[in-house]
Image (cartoon, rainbow, N blue to C red):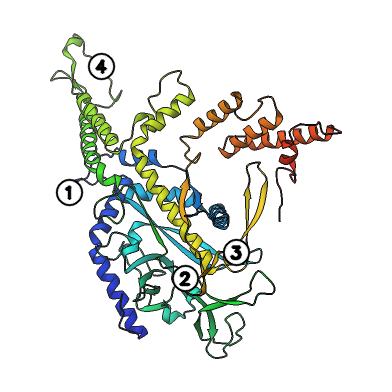
Amino acid sequence: MKIETRNKAQRLEYFKSLYENARRAYSDSLNAFKRCMEQYRGSDEIDGSTEPAATVRNVTYEIIESQVSSAIPRPKCDAPTYSEKKERLAMTVERLCRAQRDKLPFAKLNDLDERYTYIYGGSVWFVEWNNTRESAGEVGAVDVHLISAEDFIPEPYVYDVKDMEYCFLRFRTTRGALMRKYRLDAEQASLAECECEDEAFDYADTVSLIIAFYKDDSGEVGQFIFSGDIALADNEGYYRRKIALCAACGEREDRCRCEHPKLKLDIQQSEEVSGRNPMQRPISVDYYTPKDFPIVIRKNTSGEKCLLGQSDCDYIRPQQQAINKIESRILKKLLRAGVTPVVPEDASVSVNNSVFGQVIRMKPGESMSQYGKVDTTPDVSQDIAEAERLYDHTKRVLGISDAFQGTSFEAGESGYARQLRIAQSSGRLESKRKMKSVAYAELDRLIFLHYLAFSDGERKISYKDSFGRVHREVFNRYDFLEYDVASGSFCYDDDFLFSTDDDGADEYQRESTWQRNLNNLTSGTLGDPNSSETLLRYWQCQEAAHYPGARENVEYFLEKIRKEISSVQEPIEGASQEPTEILRGIRGGKEDTE
């Protein structure tokens, strides 16, 4: 994308114009997103009618919520070609991504992501490096944000983020936060604006922050941030390493003592890297710079010429509308229904439909046969049957069955058989799970690239081995340096295959995994079922599959094996040394290896 203007004010007008044009082109999709969210929340709107539904049976909410999964795919990284070093680095990258899953609030993000995906047809993830985060001497870390589809404005008529020349993210913040982060005064902050969506709401302290990502002529990613009529940041090389210097004194930002510092960004092109061998001289290596936008889109189900995926709300909207109409008709019928008393013309009492509201006292000589009633209670059985038929249609459209929702199970059915029925009924939803795995694999790739570009020093990583021991490892980006014979220089190796390991991650498969582990124990696959070592291995497998209370059993058998070993004075010739190997370095199930 070629940007002719270089002046800051001109660049602001250029990106504002680009944003408004993209937003207008995306207006139909934005309106569809709003309609889908209102439908999920139980809107009483009837398409083509100004009269709202009298009541709403929110089957959209029920069906979407039944699909929400708390399972988070586990990172998996492989080397495209085999070498001992490449395989070792791939395992380090995989452990790095797993460590980030533990540190970041992925459980919370996943919960919202599941709903966004089914409602809008997709969700948007944004990965950035936060240099203000510090922990145990490590400066900087990755932040991952989940963004509503309504706050992502793409380049018009381009349906893949990797093919885009530019795109926009929209955030809500306050003027105070804007002033603190970008060092603005009150007059400058007053130029920031908020895109009002509700005229009744007071937006005095709320502003919209627009982040533009673009690619220049060389394909390098740039960033421009603005709000209203004020430009907040202009990073032509978004991924380039930069250091803030004061234009007045020339010192770094953290060393500047000026009362009113004038900061500018100085781009660092390369770094001096010391060799592993002390006799080797330092080498100059360019900093690693990723080439992709830091944005990942998770699709629901793919569609033709569709940036996101296909929304579940759109596909079941006709059935939701029809159900609302029928339920409204049922309610109106029942509200008009009642029992109307029939009394003689000269009766001395007035009666109504209230229960026990009147007492009729008969005159002398009158007969009860002169009194009666007219029952106007309607028959709504056909309406109810039609509503249920439409509800079944709704579930079939999305491949949702009673077994998947946890209903209509047979009496006396075992838990294992129940889990198998759920797994079979969810077969049609497999493509949605695959799209989730694809998105998470791309997230892991971006996390790795950010650490390759920005992390300095060694990053500590902890992981468990197959014996349950906790090991300590480090991620060092210099380990990824490779010598390029063609260019005669060093470069960073970022060629790895990212995917996800779904084994045991899906909660619908956990009970069957537990059962398979038990079968392996009883059949002797893990060893002698009466052996403490075998039982320890079994409970370690159950712990990996998140079996309740498995960790306590692992601790119990570790302690039991330790006592068994300590009670033996001399090792028996030919006996298995596995218990010693299991317990080597373990104290409380943990090992600290340097």
Mark 2 residue element:
loop
Q: Residue at x 59, y 35 (%)?
A: 542
* Image quarter of residue 216: bottom left
The x, y position of residue 516, in whole percent, is 53, 29
The x, y position of residue 119, in whole percent, is 33, 48
Residue occupied by mark 2:
289
The disc label shown at residue 361, or none = 4
What amino acid type is highlighted by mark number 3? Asn
Crowdedness near tag 3: few (<14), some (14–19) or many (≥20) residues, C-alpha within 10 Å: some
What amino acid type is highlighted by mark number 2? Thr
Nearer mark to the viewer, of 3 and 4: 3
Task: Report how far apart the C-alphas of labels 4 and 2 lie in the structure.
Answer: 95 Å
Nearer mark to the viewer, of 1 and 4: 1
Residue 373 lies left or right of residue 129; in this view the side is left
Task: Report how far apart the C-alphas of labels 3 and 4 lie in the structure.
Answer: 96 Å
> Does 560 appear above or below 482?
above
Task: Report how far apart the C-alphas of labels 3 and 2 lie in the structure.
Answer: 16 Å
Residue occupied by mark 1:
50
Q: Residue at x 60, y 79 (%)?
A: 254
Mark 1 residue element:
loop
Residue occupied by mark 3:
476
Circles 3 and 1: CB atoms closer than 8 Å:
no
Name of the residue lying farthest toward the front:
485
Of mark 2 and mark 1, the one earlier in the sequence is 1
Nearer mark to the viewer, of 4 and 2: 2
Of the pair 33 and 548, the residue shown nearer to us? 548
Q: Residue at x 26, y 50 (%)?
A: 303
Name of the residue lying farthest toward the left:
345
Mark 4 residue element:
loop
Of mark 3 and mark 4, the one earlier in the sequence is 4
> Does 53 appear above or below 340?
below
